[in-house]
DNA sequence: CTATGTGAAGACATTCACAGCG
DNA sequence: CGCTGTGAATGTCTTCACATAG
């Protein structure tokens, strides 16, 4: 392949799944895997995995497959998750608290390092190992810790205002749980977690098979 | 267009976003909207919206645009969310509790009607308006209430076992928060909420702009 | 004159199928 | 012989651009 081809975003979004599956393989003590086997675990075709990886180099051995640990390291490096990415979390309601305490965020390059809320009743409260800070201080913390990543877990109507402040302070990528499309400069990345929309897209298919109760 | 063309899944996944945006427009008292205006709110091109809608019929007025309320009703009907979809939630840890209490799930066709966990300490506990039930009873509840939709919020290693039970009991669509790809029959729908993977895919781009702290 | 609906074109993503290497 | 890596072929999705309707 032309190495000058940029990897499509859809490929980038699959890499974390490959990485996770490789970690599970390692935990099972499996040290070698073919594109076929890896694909079966994550419901992706073998050709797709090989093509995806080919955007970044040649990591396998013909006739053998891939060394799990080496491939994992390659992917972690490609994604940049071999480095440490501090994240701020804004909005410490029930969802925010669950996010703040979720172990999955403490590993694999990502670490929530500060919690913010505007509610005086929440400021000062301990959540997991962190103390909730006043959102008014978010700029200073983002600047001091050179934070580029943020998670927003505030109500829909506050999400845009929060995003504006975060971006102005230096955040370059946002994961938002608010049911609201954010308007951001084109050099800022935004992704959404939207369980209601996901469920509603599945009802489309269910409604066509058999009616609901 | 050929009405015989099936709408692509990517179109189905956008419909809930259109619906939500239309609801916000209604709340703002706006009753007419062009594909251009709607597109600007949700960062989708006008042509895409018109093409998407064309899979299902003709809902606009040339020279004018769309009647917000009518288009919303059409989309809700297409998605099947004009009907009532009862959902079971399995796994009442911190995340499960946040999901159970989230208001967004109570509207728009979706309603969580039963909570399940296997932990004796959690069974019997009240969460919002519901009481946590023993997961051992999940089959009976799914059958009695004709439930087709489930949300899984259990640890990764338990997710497959939980999914197997749910599907056997009659569930046809699953929204899973577990960081694990589920193996299911091909007539069952599965979608994932995977915030860690989403964050990790954004670090790819950040790592290429400027190094993290 | 404005904005929809839609074939056709173009861009993008996936799969195929096989040369080539270990 | 098995499995990777990859051009080419196929399939899918998005955008274009304009005929058409109000």
Image (cartoon, coloured by chain):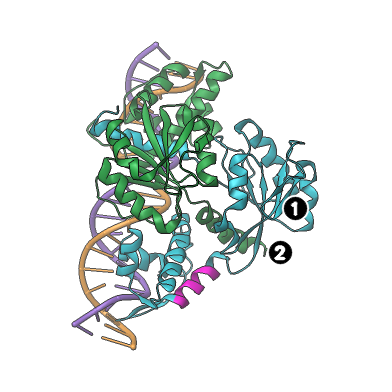
Chain colours: A green, B cyan, C purple, D orange
Residue B28 drawn above or below residue B167:
below
User: Quadrant location of the N terminus of chain B?
Assistant: bottom left
Q: Name the element at disc 1.
A: helix
Q: Is residue B77 visible?
A: yes
Q: Position of residue B75 (x, y in %)?
A: 49, 69
Q: Quadrant of residue B43?
A: bottom left
Magenta span has B112? no
Q: Quadrant of residue B25?
A: bottom left
Relative to A50, A129 lies left or right: right
Between the C-alphas of marks 1 and 2, the distance is 11 Å
Residue B65 drawn above or below residue B40:
below
Q: How many marks?
A: 2
Q: Residue at x 25, y 46 (%)?
A: A168
Q: Main secondary structure of the magenta part?
A: helix
Q: Position of residue A118 (x, y in %)?
A: 42, 48
Residue C19 drawn above or below residue B133:
above
| Chain to which mark 2 belongs | A
Q: Which residue is mark 2?
A: A213
Asked if marks 1 and 2 fall on the same chain, the answer is: no
Q: Nearer the viewer, residue D13 or B208?
A: B208
Q: Position of residue A13 (x, y in %)?
A: 40, 39
Q: Nearer the viewer, residue D10 or A67?
A: A67
User: Quadrant location of the C terminus of chain B?
Assistant: top left
Which mark is on residue B142? 1
| Chain to which mark 1 belongs | B
**Residue span colored magenta:** B69-77
Q: Name the element at disc 2.
A: loop
Q: Residue at x 38, y 27 (%)?
A: A81
Q: Nearer the viewer, residue D20 or B125?
A: B125
Q: Residue at x 32, y 81 (%)?
A: B64
Q: Residues within 10 Å of mark 1 (few under 14, many from 20)?
A: many
């Amino acid at each position: 392949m032309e190495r000058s081809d940029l990897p499509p975003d859809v490929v980038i979004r699959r890499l974390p799944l490959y990485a996770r599956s490789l970690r599970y393989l390692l935990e099972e003590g499996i040290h070698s895997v073919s594109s076929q086997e890896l694909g079966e675990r994550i419901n992706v075709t073998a050709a797709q995995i090989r093509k995806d990886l080919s955007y970044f180099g040649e990591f396998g051995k013909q006739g053998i497959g891939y060394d799990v640990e080496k491939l994992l390291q390659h992917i972690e490096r490609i994604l940049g998750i071999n480095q440490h990415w501090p994240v701020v979390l804004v909005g410490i309601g029930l969802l925010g608290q669950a996010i703040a305490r979720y172990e999955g965020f403490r590993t694999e390059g990502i670490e929530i390092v500060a919690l913010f809320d505007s509610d005086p009743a929440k400021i000062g409260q301990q959540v997991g190992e962190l103390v909730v800070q006043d959102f008014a201080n978010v700029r200073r913390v983002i600047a001091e810790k050179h934070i580029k990543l943020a998670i927003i877990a505030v109500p829909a109507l506050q999400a845009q205002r929060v995003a504006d402040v975060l971006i102005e302070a230096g955040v370059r990528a946002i994961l938002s749980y608010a049911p609201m499309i954010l308007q951001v400069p084109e050099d800022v990345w935004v992704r959404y977690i939207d369980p209601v929309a996901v469920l509603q897209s599945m009802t489309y298919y269910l409604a066509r098979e058999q009616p609901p109760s």
